Image (tube, grey):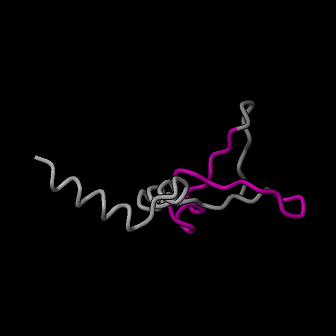
Amino acid sequence: MLAKRTSKNQVTLPKAIVQMVGEADYYDVSVQDGKIVLTPVRIHQAEKVRSKLEELGIGPEDVADAIAWARKCP
């Protein structure tokens, strides 16, 4: 299938291709052997939260302690 690049470097993905791989709002773009490769990225909110908690060094015990503390507050 053909896809045309516009003057703004935009490409419209053919509907049949999107249906084969499933819809995604974001694509990881890479180059492999001189070819542009688009890989659908499905961002899951839970994964974003887990990633941020890990980045901040917050573990399950910290979350449990915070919930216990919050339940004690009026």
| Residue situated furthest top in the rendering | 7
**Relative height, residue 31 to residue 8 (above, below):** below
Q: Position of residue 2 (x, y in %)?
A: 72, 54
Residue closer to the observer: 17 or 28:
28
Residue pictured at 68% horizontal, 39% vertical: 10
Is residue 8 found inside the magenta-colored segment of the image? no
From the viewer's perspective, is 33 left or right of 25?
A: right
From the viewer's perspective, is 46 left or right of 67?
A: right
Is residue 17 found inside the magenta-colored segment of the image? yes
Residue pictured at 16% horizontal, 56% vertical: 71
Image mark count: 0
Residue closer to the observer: 26 or 44:
44
Residue pictured at 89% horizontal, 64% vertical: 33
Q: Quadrant of the N terminus?
A: bottom right
Q: Position of residue 50 (x, y in %)?
A: 46, 61
Q: Position of residue 21 (x, y in %)?
A: 57, 67
**Relative height, residue 20 to residue 57 (above, below):** below
| Residue situated furthest left in the rendering | 74
Residue closer to the observer: 19 or 71:
71
Residue pictured at 55% horizontal, 55% vertical: 55
Q: Which residues are magenta?
A: 10-35
From the viewer's perspective, is 33 left or right of 45?
A: right
| Residue situated furthest right in the rendering | 33
Q: Position of residue 26 (x, y in %)?
A: 57, 51
Picture quadrant where residue 63 is located: bottom left
